[in-house]
Amino acid sequence: MTDIVSPVQGVVVSKAPVRRDIGLKRRYAAERRFRLYGIAAISFGLIFLAILLTSIISKGYTAFQQTAITLPIEFSEKVLDPNNKRATDPSVLVAANYSVLIRDAMIKALNLNASSRPDVRDATAMVSKGAPIQLRDMVVADPSLIGKTVNVTLLADANIDSANKGQIDLKVDEKNRKVNDKQVGWMNQLAESGALHKKFNTGLFVNGNSSRPEAAGLGVALIGSLYLMLIVLVLSLPIGVAASIYLEEFAPKNKLTDLIEVNINNLAAVPSIVYGLLGLAVFINFAGLPRSASLVGGLVLTLMTLPTIIIATRAALRAVPPSIRAAALGLGASKMQMVFHHVLPLAMPGILTGTIIGLAHALGETAPLLLIGMVAFVANAPATPLEPSTALPVQVYMWANEAERAFVERTSGAIIVLLLFLIVMNLGAILLRRRFERRW
């Protein structure tokens, strides 16, 4: 250490405090920079998350509303059953031309000239093409409607729905949009009379897939996702917990168990599409299980979720203090009793948390389900897991590939529903952790 002499006072001063002060300043500056880097990283992440959520919500919140037109439908016997054969041949009501009823109702509601075919065609096109099926089902279910005039609420066509929600720029030239000026005027006329209005889109949660955007819904996807999650829960939880207990508490520590542990950790990092290829080869091609079925999808997602549950369960078992094990054994409990009566109940919060997180991960997977055929067009809800079905993420993928403008809001609406499911599942994991967690 070198000393310096002050020329003013002649006092010997050491360099050590000076160097120490410089080192402290550099360390504090480094800590401040690191803190700023962390804050900047979190801020960037939150900004991009806010942009993503804003984009999805701004495009998808309108999917929860649907434009409808309420019309006085005259169930004319001349149209539905001109020869009065319904008593002997009920199929007459099924084959009747219900589009005529809608056409006549629109003519009366808009005071149109029935001989003007272009006007009649454009007016009728404002109602969904699925409306005749709705009227048919009403008449088949209740034939007493024949001869009566009933106010019926019908879905508007997808283009009318988009225009009513402001998603179509009506200032653009008429040739460059799918809603012409006459239809815009009729929309305003019906809206002023209260016939055209918005309602909550229950069809989004009840209907199956459809080529008509206004009639497309998530009903089949919701049921398929429910089947998938039930199958994954029933299979992956007991198998994963049993494997974890054996590896952690009973298996001897040797090269074989070390190899198994390494492979489990590696399986957790395998891309999900590989599990789809495995399911296609084993469950469909070899075992002959039905393609597009929820059962196959559940088996594939079970294979994908098992490593996550095993890793989380082993971590929860390790978190139980060794004193619990020693005390149980010291009081005369067998090793089996020690594990199932003392260690496992204390590790259950961590096990449940890992299971819910694994289920949430499986719920958002798309690639393995595409490979086993769950991308099929399914309009009717599956009664059993063996029937063709689809899932929420697959439905989002299918709608995102559609060319119709109205499917854009349906896609974002389905993403909102999927995100809500994921948020609820993750909140459940957090609440379970806080409710049952014990600190040692």
Image: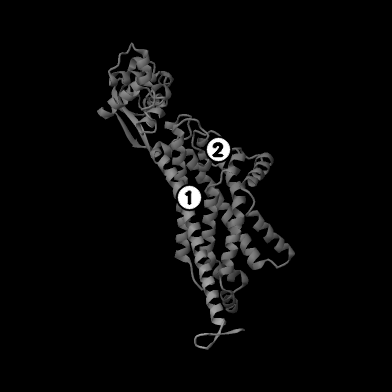
Vertical relation: 15 (above or below) 203: below
Quick one: 398 or 293, which is closer to the camera? 398
* The image quarter in which residue 55 lies: top left
Most extreme residue toward the right is 255
Residue visible at 59% across and 74% down? 322
Residue linked to disc 1: 48
Residue visible at 39% across and 22% down? 174
Vertical relation: 82 (above or below) 227: above
Tag 1, which secondary structure? helix
Point out residue 135 in the picture as x, y percentages from the top left corner. Answer: 37, 25
Label 2 CA crowd tier, 10 Å (few <14, some 14–19, many 20+): some
> Mark 2 or 1, which is nearer the eye?
1
Which quarter of the rendered picture does the N terminus lie within?
Answer: bottom right
- Relative horizontal placement of residue 68, taking residue 213 as reference (left or right): left
- Relative horizontal placement of residue 48, taking residue 253 as reference (left or right): left
Q: Are marks 2 and 1 in contact (CB under 8 Å)?
A: no
Point out residue 122 in the picture as x, y percentages from the top left corner. Answer: 37, 19
> Rounded to the nearest whole Å, what is the CA distance between mark 2 and mark 1?
40 Å
